[in-house]
Amino acid sequence: MSLLLAAEQAHNFWDFSSVLDPANLGTNLIALLTLTLLEVVLGIDNVVFIAIVAAKLPPAQQAKARRTGLLLALITRVLFLATITFILGLATKKLGFAIPFSGYEPTGKDLVLIAGGLFLIYKATKEIHVRVEGEEEGAEVRAAPAAFWPTIGQILVIDLIFSIDSVVTAVGMAKELLVMVAAVVISVGVMLAAAGPISAFISKHPTMKMLALSFLLLIGVVLVAEGVGQHISKGYIYFGMAFALSVETLNIVSRRKRAKGTVGVALPDSALKSR
């Protein structure tokens, strides 16, 4: 279903009479399962950003920040679904001017994507710079803990950016508003369960944090590219990051095995005689 067609049928989304109709039950269930999976995949970058930003808070506040951030994501997505006509208008209506050097006429959604992409590029580049500079000095970077509400503000900004894509995807996949809301709620529940382990894993392994920052940097570039009319399939990006993650996981396993192999190794006889 195209976005324009969805916009024309938006008033029907509030008609819930057909949701549990036996004739539509199978279709709605398939749409729910498919959309939930897509929402979880689209939410990966959101979870990674929240995990990295929350890690700068004092340990006692990190879990609360992750929960707050994901609950804000749930609220923004549901509110956007409730104002579906406005969101679809934002995604389809041209603003009447062209972007320099490209000639592309952006929509309101495009401007939001550009702003969000630049914000992600700035945050990821800044974090990478801090880590690289700290490593060059041979010491761990020990910045002062971030404040809670400014951190939540950053999370809210990214939630707003990613919520637009989430809502547009939902409208393209399902016809019933209740199916969309249910898929969003379930996907956010999955992300809430996964946010803690993902955050702990990233914090425990510095190379994984660098990969996560590189992932956010790449997503920022893709958002800016889409904002100027250059569509790049996120499937290629997710595949590349999954491959890099798999390679680094093998490296972590290999380092652990080598570390265990050096524990309790007997010294050679020549070494013992020299003592």
Image: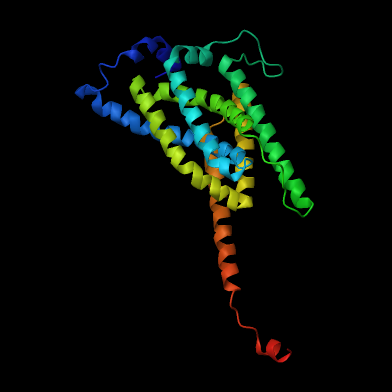
Rendered residue at 31%/31% (across/down): 30
179 shown above or below 191: above
In percent of width and height, residue 235 lies at 51, 36
Figure coloring: rainbow
In percent of width and height, residue 231 lies at 57, 26
From the viewer's perspective, tell me whether residue 132 is left or right of residue 215: right
Rendered residue at 70%/87% (across/down): 271
Extreme residue in the left direction: 22
From the viewer's perspective, tell me whether residue 259 is left or right of residue 11: right
In percent of width and height, residue 267 lies at 64, 83
Extreme residue in the bottom direction: 273
194 shown above or below 254: above
Where does the N terminus fall, quadrant-wise? top left
Choose between 6 and 153: the one closer to the eye: 153
Q: Quadrant of residue 179?
A: top left
Choose between 209 and 173: the one closer to the eye: 209
Q: Quadrant of residue 225?
A: top right
From the viewer's perspective, tell me whether residue 230 is left or right of residue 41: right
From the viewer's perspective, tell me whether residue 35 is left or right of residue 147: left
